Structure formats: structure tokens, C-alpha cells
Image (cartoon, rainbow, N blue to C red):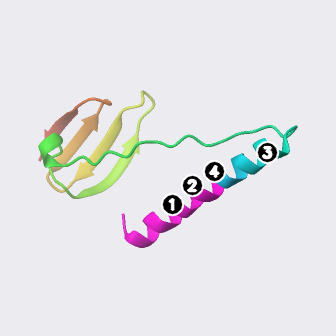
Amino acid sequence: MSWGRWNRARACVIIAAAQCLIAVLLGDIPVVCAQQLSIRHYDKRDGLPSNRVECIHQDAKGYLWFGTWEGLSRFDGYRFTSYGC
């Protein structure tokens, strides 16, 4: 992620937190705050065939499929299963 995108994402989180705080202070306004999700970087050490992912697809069962030039991988939330070229 580039620094520009990271700064925009950080600004959005700060704005959302400020809006939640204002809503709580004003009372009588239903409060809905976004949850912060963790970000994890996966690469060849984790089982991907390549560090360069060309496409990603989530199937009906929830598996994530990653297409690389070195093969196809399926991620089940814990580990990658790779199908090489």
C-alpha cells in the first residue's frame, strides 16, 4: 500500500472515530462505529507460488483463490493449497 493510500485510510479512521465520539456526546443518536480489521501480508513463505498475485476470487464456499504466473492457490483461512503450472 502506498503512503498516499495509507494516509487516506488513516484519515478515514480518524474521521469515523470523531463522528462516533460526537454522536455519543450528543446522546439520543444511535451509534454505529466501524470495526478495524487486521491486515495480513502473505507471500511465498506462506505457501503462495509467487509474491506477485495477478487476480483474486472468492468462491461460494468462502475460499479465496489467488492466480499468479507460477500457479493457482486456494486459501482456506489458515493455509494455501497450490496447484502449479
For the residue marked with disc 4, what is the amino acid? Ala
Query: How crowded is the residue under tag 4: few (<14 C-alpha within 10 Å), some, or many (20+)?
Result: some
- State the CA–CA distance, disc 3 to disc 2: 18 Å
Label 1 to label 2, Cα distance in Å? 6 Å
Q: Amino acid at mark 3?
A: Leu
In the image, is 78 to the left or to the right of 44?
A: right
Q: Position of residue 16 (x, y in %)?
A: 64, 53
Instruction: Please say if the residues under marks 3 and 4 sit with CB atoms less than 8 Å apart.
Output: no
Q: Mark 3 or mark 4: name the one nearer the start of the chain.
A: 4
Q: Secondary structure at mark 2?
A: helix
Instruction: Identify the secondary structure beneath mark 3.
Output: helix
In primary-sequence order, the first of circles 1 and 3 is: 1
Q: Which residue is mark 1?
A: 9
Of helix, strand and loop, which one carries label 1? helix
Crowd class of label 3 (few under 14; some 14 to 19; many from 20; radius 10 Å): few
Name the amino acid, label 1.
Answer: Ala
Report if residue 17 lies within the magenta region.
no
For disc 2, the neighbor class at 10 Å (few under 14, some 14 to 19, many from 20) is some
Q: Amino acid at mark 2?
A: Val
Q: Tags 1 and 2 in contact by the CB under 8 Å rule?
A: yes
The part of the chain drawn in magenta is 1-16
Q: In this figure, which residue is indicated by the disc labeled 4?
A: 17
Q: Which residue is mark 2?
A: 13
1 or 4: tag closer to the N-terminus: 1
The residue where tag 3 is placed is 25
Pointer 1 and pointer 4: residues touching (CB < 8 Å)?
A: no
- Residue at coordinates 16% horizontally, 39% vertically from top-left? 83
Secondary structure mainly formed by the magenta segment: helix
Instruction: Please name the residue shown 52% across and 66% down the image.
Output: 8
Q: Is residue 72 left or right of residue 18?
A: left
